[in-house]
Amino acid sequence: MKRHLTITLCLLLTIVIFGITIGDVRFEGLITIEESYLKQLVSDYLNVELNEKGVQEMLRKIFETGYFSSLTPNLVFNGNFYVLIVKVEENPKISDWRIEIVGPGLIKKKDLEEAVTIEKGKALNINKIRESLEKIKSLYDSEGYFLIEVGGELDKDVYILKIVEHALWEIYFEGETEGIDFSKIRKEMKVDTLKDYYTTPGILRVFLKDIKRCYPKKTTIMEIMSVLSKYVYFAPETSIDFEPMDIPGVKERVVRMRINVVQRKIIDKPKSFEQIRFTGNSQISSLQLLNVTQLKEGETYSNADILKAMQTIVDFYNEKGFAGVSVQAKDLGNILEFEVFEKFVADVRFEGLTLTKPYVIKDLITFEKGEPLTKQDFYDTISALNRTQFFESASVYPVVENDPRSAVVVIDVKEKEKKFNLSGGVAWTPLKDRPWYEGFAGQVSLSTINPFGYGESFSFNGELGFYSTKIDFSFSIRRPFDIPAILDANVVYQRDYGFDSSTVSFDIFKIGGNISTLRLDGHSFGFGPAYEWRTYYPSSGNIQEQTLILSANYSYDTRNNVLFATKGQYLSIGLQKAGLFDPLDDRSYWKATLDARYFIPLFNDNLALGFRVYGTTLLFESYRKENDFKNAGIPDAIYGEYILFYGMNAVRGMGSSKAKAGALASVEIRYDLKSQTVPIYLVGFADVGGTGKSLTDLDINITAGPELDIVVPMFGALGFGVAYHFDGNWTWDNLKTFFRFGSTF
């Protein structure tokens, strides 16, 4: 659209040389723009003396409103003052506008629409168009997307804002590629491409792939450059660019990434060296490095041989657990020198802690100033941060600033946007000798983790059924007031009404607390008291019990993820003693629990083997008011102490149960499907376990089968599976479907 401002009057140009006063301005050709708006715009130029420049500024201000394609002024003297008559040609009238996106819609369309300032029912405003396009582009920029085209066009009286989102089809290397294994480098990049997306079978694609991951961000380039920096082959001149492509049968707009390889040059042509030496290496001896490179003094080597030796040194440090090590080779005449830059921790810096107080998590950071940078510290720190479930994501990376031998460790976290989770529903449990509908119960749950940034978590669970009510409130806080401990509190109220006259109603109120140490090298100890008040309501009169329970526990945890581990160990030992002294010893028993888990990664971080042994038992039970219960006709099944076995503590496919003791041994092979939507794991399992009166008198069941687990933050894992019950009879009836909700081992 051509726009021009025309000033044609010789009279105007002549008079304004001497200065004139314009008393009024009038407009001809206005259709959608109010004259009052324009007059207000130039009111400061009226009734004041103007020269040529002043008149031009006045006209330019009108033109720069953006509504007009041309202005033609005319100056008329009415006998008293000059009147500026401006003949305008408005831009086409806009009745509507819309956004068209070529791509999956990386930004919510609602957010894009809110960025548009185009006015409907008025002349097209060039300024509003430009402003809208810039705002849309800034929305993509803020999310890191850079392969975006934003433009617009007028279709009759509708302005169309066109956004083209470009996906990454593939990555390829070009240039000096001799002697480099690019398959290993490409695999390490872990960058999603649209080519991989479309080569994934359709049904798997629905569950495992997110097409938006194929649209690169600026961080994608940073990650690629980070991978390239780990390999000594690439000179600083190595570059990245993008080429548009047309792929038959693919509707998305795509580009491919070209990495132009320029190899590092140590020597121009093959030569021999009388001496090979190493400098800067304090963690690994020079003799070890010489042996691992397999270089020999006096032999002839090419530039590719030296680069290979440099990479071998870096890989050897990596195998030994050191991180961030780099190597430079120097041709010093008859000497080939390898200068090793081992990295040491200079400082630790937090980024992204917009809510969480640094003191809450400082003990989880295992890096120490002056110590070598190690892969184990990265693993321990990230695993510990993930186990807190405080953050949407957590990453740890080194930044080299001034000294090439030191690095600042950056702890980069993303706070959770969703602080609270409220859910509810209806559960059904069959009741013996009762109508089916009486098994329904309404449930509500409210939970939150670290909502205010002090390491606190709350959970409230309520259940209301025909014959029972249960309310459970839990609270936990990590490092309260920077005290190196974790405090837990729990309040439970349960009311059972009894089915009929043959059963009895009762209340249970329990309040307790626990204090545990922060983990030191994975170890933690804890102890705490709990008070329990029970009231039974038989027809013969109420029976009340009061019991004090003390518990002690020890745990060791190095798992990489608390929801679904693929690496690390876990051990928990717990001991409870109920009934210590009168009058808080109406119930007396010991309860012991052991939970041991071990995870072995088999293939990268995709495939893992998991083992678990779990056992718990009640010992030395006695009830002060046992005779009162018996005289009132209350069976042991109601007043006695029992352990409930369900979820991950029950043999899969066999349902839940309650007993005095139980044990379970499980083995799983876990495959991470690398879903780009929610974490999904395919599991093959075998369970051996049972419950009974004691650990020596268990009803053993054996099951095995497949399971699909979907990990949902705040909820845990949703498990769906089929278990075959091995009871000696090979029948279809032994196939049991099951659903698990909550924790996995």
Image (spheres, rainbow, N blue to C red):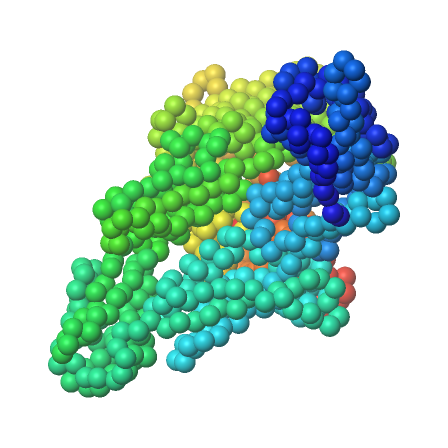
Q: Nearer the viewer, residue 653 or 490?
A: 490
Q: Nearer the viewer, residue 461 or 732?
A: 461
Q: Total marks drawn?
A: 0
**Residue visible at 41% across and 80% down in the picture:** 178
**Residue visible at 52% across and 68% down in the picture:** 258
As drawn, 247 above or below 532: below
Work out whether residue 383 can be spotted.
yes
**Residue visible at 63% across and 18% down in the picture:** 49
As drawn, 186 above or below 690: below
Work out whether residue 635 can be spotted.
no
- Give the x, y percent position of residue 629: 63, 24
As drawn, 414 above or below 222: above
* Res 737 → quadrant: bottom right
Side of 81 where 286 appears, left or right: left
Side of 314 where 669 appears, left or right: right
Q: Nearer the viewer, residue 200 or 445?
A: 200
- Give the x, y percent position of residue 207: 69, 58
- Give the x, y percent position of residue 708: 65, 57
**Residue visible at 42% across and 67% down in the picture:** 238
Q: Nearer the viewer, residue 555 or 621?
A: 555
- Give the x, y percent position of residue 361: 40, 36
